[in-house]
Image (cartoon, helix red, strand yellow):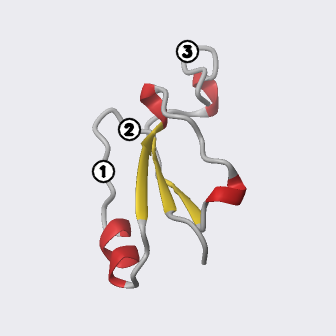
Amino acid sequence: MSGPIVLLHHLETPVVGFAADALASRGAELEERDVRRGDALPALEEVGGIVSLGGEQSVRDIARCPEL
């Protein structure tokens, strides 16, 4: 695996749950991005993986949440 595992946050208050502990225990380098606050998505060739964490948004919110 090359590059960090990027955790994408979509909640008002970001939470990684069990994901960060599980990945870190396997030696993964983690990088968190807060999509809701405008953090850029990573280039795929620069990361070892992406974990997209859930949020309260739905497809009905596209007009209100342009990051969707």
Disc 3: which residue: 64
Residue 55, image x, y percentages: 44, 41
Q: Residue furthest top?
A: 63
Instruction: Please name the amino acid that badge 1 sits on.
Output: Val
* Between 56 and 68, the one nearer to me in the picture: 68
Which class describes the residues within 10 Å of circle 1: few (<14), some (14-19), or many (20+)?
some
Where residue 25 appears, as percent x and y from the top left, is 33, 82
In front of the other: label 3 or label 1?
1
Residue under the point 38% across and 68% down: 19
Verify CB contact (< 8 Å) between mark 2 and mark 1: yes
Circle 3 SS class: loop
User: What is the quadrant of the N terminus in the image?
Assistant: bottom right
In the picture provided, is 47 more to the left or to the right than 44? left
Identity of the residue drawn at 63% across and 15% down: 63
Looking at marks 3 and 1 on the same chain, the residue that comes earlier in the sequence is marked by 1
Residue density around tag 3, few if under 14, some if 14–19, many if 20 or more, within 10 Å? few
User: Separation of disc 2 and disc 1 at Cα?
Assistant: 8 Å
Q: Quadrant of residue 23?
A: bottom left
The residue that label 2 is drawn on is: 11
- Looking at the rendered structure, the secondary structure element under dot 1 is loop
**Disc with the residue nearer the chain's start (2 vs 3):** 2
Farthest residue, direction bottom: 26
At mark 2, the secondary structure is loop
Residue at (59% x, 41% y) in the render: 41
State the mark number for residue 15. 1
Label 2 and label 3: CA atoms lie apart by: 15 Å
Against 60, residue 54 (above or below) is: below
Q: Quadrant of residue 22?
A: bottom left
In contact (CB < 8 Å): disc 3 and disc 1: no
